[in-house]
Amino acid sequence: MANASTRRLLAAALAAPALALAAPTVALADGALESNMDYAGPGGTAAQDTVTAADEAGNAIWGEQTGAAGPGGVYSDSAVAAVSGQD
């Protein structure tokens, strides 16, 4: 069961950046999205926070923070990406 949860967490972590940067810029309007995920179970705990925003000029920013703890140890990661549109 823990392996399925790990696969889901990894799939979400890999898909989030592409979705987070593409969706708001296609909308052609000011927008923001925040997503939070928390998990606790017999195999450990995990949390992921993703924030993205874009404006009409095409400027976009994406940020993600992920953490997990379980029998194998502790993992923590964060990333930020920005795209500058036309001023």
Image (tube, grey):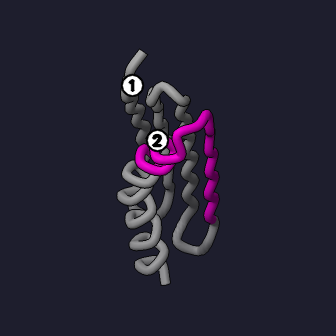
Determine contact: label 2, label 1, CB under 8 Å.
yes
Give the CA distance from mark 2 to mark 1.
Answer: 9 Å
Instruction: Specify start and end residues of the magenta stretch as a single range.
Output: 20-39
66 vs 40, nearest the viewer: 66
Tag 1: residue type? Gly
Element type at mark 2: helix
Which residue is rendered at x = 62% and y = 39% of the image? 32
Any mark on residue 85, and which? Answer: 1
Quarter of the image with the C terminus is top left
* Residue depicted at x 61% and y 72%: 41
Residue 35: x and y in percent read: 62, 51
Amino acid beneath label 2 = Thr
| Label located before the other in sequence (2 or 1) | 2
Within 10 angstroms of label 2, few (less than 14), some, or many (20 or more) residues?
Answer: many
- Residue 83 sits in quarter: top left
Q: Is residue 6 left or right of residue 54?
A: left
Is residue 15 or residue 19 the one in the foreground? 19
> Which residue is at a point 39% across and 73% down the rendered structure image?
7
Residue 45: x and y in percent read: 57, 60
Is 43 placed above or below 17 here? Answer: below
> Would you place residue 31 above or below residue 20 in this image?
above
